[in-house]
Image (tube, coloured by chain):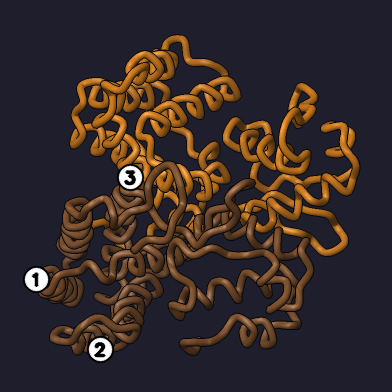
């Protein structure tokens, strides 16, 4: 559960709760498989149970939550195939985001915001704790996607619910830092091809981790 | 789904569904049949009246469709079937390039192992039958089916869900009058190449040919005059 109370400030209350839970999934504050208990959520967010129920319904419509008969709701736990499916899409979409960010790195403010978001991810010796790292990672992808400035790309990426699997796929900190360094260098150099390649390679390294988390092997060999 | 269905008919058929669902279905089927076109105004009063649904559900339906990018919703200007600005067209096609490329790649693996192979061959034949004909609702349907087989064959449920089918349809509707016969001929040559790659089992080539096809479409559309696109600042019907 989140450490601080998140009183919704703008927009409809249930929308704000949905946003906080989605963000919480990216940041590791909520986890796949976690049960959502209405009265607890209502107390935590300082809203009525009706508002919580509305939020839970929206999350169900987005495929993030599943209602369990007479047992409230649970955040979905994707199967290995579902996780693979999501990551395959993530690979090409994040690749595109990196490519487009590289193309637009000279837009006003882009370079500065990207460098600021990149820096904390490239130092493995001072690797932040998991929760903090997840926040920084989230910030990095947001910065990159914002620079890409493609609303369709953002929409697809945000609907992907890859956060349901992302935090379970752990990479060695040194290798992880190197991946971000490569992506960052290519984007900052305006190297569209290189940025796309580096971003896709990073997501593929996550796909390779699937077998450590799920038991069954790959359904088919990769052709490269 | 039959063509040329009126909004009222669509409403009657679905009385068992929730009220917003009725409205969403009716609008979507209106767009699919060409009864509603990009840039067209959607008037709340007309919808409540013809669908026999109250304003609350109509508003909810319009919000949902706006979230899907099928309509645009504005406090002052109202609701419109979405017409795309130049940037939106380019952005959408760059995204479509990569996800359709992925679709073709995954379909190739599956078809290589026998899944949906005959169905895909038939869908290809059906599409190619339109090569020397002009544009038509039937051609659009045949093309939709071609890509639909690929999506299904690939077996990636998330990809099916992520594919913005209505937006693709709106895109096609917005520009179908603007496709020259040279462009159309090029498209059909590209479909041949995509199909050949898929049937030969070369997933990498299938992805590449598909991406190339969509990239060429993006180039073609990017050369169209301003009148083909929605202006960035206001909604109006696209000529």
Give the foreground label among 3 and 2.
Answer: 3
Q: Residue at x 76, y 23 (%)?
A: A3
In this rendering, position of residue B58 left or right of residue A196? right
Q: Is residue A125 above or below residue A36?
A: above
Residue B72: x %, y % from top left: 53, 54
Residue B95: x %, y % from top left: 33, 51
Q: CA distance from mark 3 to mark 2?
A: 33 Å
Location of residue A15 (image quadrant):
top right
- Earlier sequence position, callout 3 versus callout 2: 3
Q: CA distance from mark 3 to mark 1?
A: 24 Å
Q: Are marks 3 and 1 on the same chain?
A: yes
In the picture, the disc for residue B126 is 2
Residue B137: x %, y % from top left: 34, 83
Quadrant of the frame with the C terminus of chain B: bottom left
The residue that disc 1 covers is B182
Residue A167: x %, y % from top left: 54, 36
- Earlier sequence position, callout 1 versus callout 2: 2
Count the labels in the image: 3
């Amino acid at each position: 559960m989140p450490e601080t109370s998140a009183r919704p400030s703008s927009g409809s209350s249930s929308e704000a709760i949905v946003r906080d839970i989605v963000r919480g999934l990216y940041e590791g504050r909520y986890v796949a498989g976690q049960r959502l208990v209405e009265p607890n959520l209502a107390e935590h967010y300082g809203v009525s149970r009706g508002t919580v129920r509305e939020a839970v319904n929206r999350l169900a419509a987005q495929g993030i939550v599943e209602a369990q008969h007479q047992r409230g709701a649970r955040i979905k736990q994707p199967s290995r195939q579902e996780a693979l499916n999501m990551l395959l899409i993530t690979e090409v979409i994040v690749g595109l985001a990196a490519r487009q960010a590289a193309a637009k790195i000279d837009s006003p403010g882009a370079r500065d915001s990207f460098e600021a978001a990149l820096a904390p991810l490239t130092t493995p010796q001072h690797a932040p704790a998991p929760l903090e790292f997840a926040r920084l990672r989230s910030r990095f992808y947001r910065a990159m996607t914002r620079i890409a400035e493609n609303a369709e790309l953002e929409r697809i990426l945000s609907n992907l619910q890859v956060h349901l699997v992302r935090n379970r796929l752990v990479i060695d900190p040194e290798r992880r830092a190197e991946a971000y360094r490569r992506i960052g260098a290519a984007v900052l150099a305006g190297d569209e091809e290189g940025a796309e390649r580096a971003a896709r390679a990073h997501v593929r390294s996550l796909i390779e981790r699937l077998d450590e988390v799920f038991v069954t092997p790959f359904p088919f060999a990769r052709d490269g | 789904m039959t063509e040329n269905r009126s909004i009222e008919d669509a409403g009657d058929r679905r009385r068992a569904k929730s009220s917003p669902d009725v409205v969403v279905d009716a609008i979507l089927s209106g767009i699919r049949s060409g009864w509603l076109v990009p840039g067209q105004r959607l008037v709340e009063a007309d919808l409540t009246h013809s669908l026999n649904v109250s304003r609350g559900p109509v508003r909810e339906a319009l919000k949902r469709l706006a979230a899907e990018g099928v309509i645009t919703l504005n406090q002052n200007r109202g609701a419109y079937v979405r017409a795309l600005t130049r940037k939106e067209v380019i952005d959408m096609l760059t995204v479509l390039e990569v996800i359709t490329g992925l679709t073709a790649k995954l379909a190739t693996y599956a078809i290589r192992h026998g899944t949906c192979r005959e169905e895909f061959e038939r869908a290809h034949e059906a599409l190619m039958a339109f090569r020397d004909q002009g544009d038509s609702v039937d051609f659009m349907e045949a093309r939709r089916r071609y890509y639909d087989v690929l999506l299904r064959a690939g077996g990636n449920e998330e990809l099916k869900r992520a594919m913005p089918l209505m937006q693709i349809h709106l895109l096609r509707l917005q520009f179908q009058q603007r496709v020259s016969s040279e462009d159309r001929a090029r498209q059909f040559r590209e479909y041949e190449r995509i199909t050949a790659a898929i049937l030969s089992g070369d997933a990498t080539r299938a992805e590449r040919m598909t991406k190339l096809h969509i990239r060429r479409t993006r180039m073609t559309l990017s050369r169209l005059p301003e009148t083909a696109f929605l202006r960035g600042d206001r909604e109006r019907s696209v000529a």
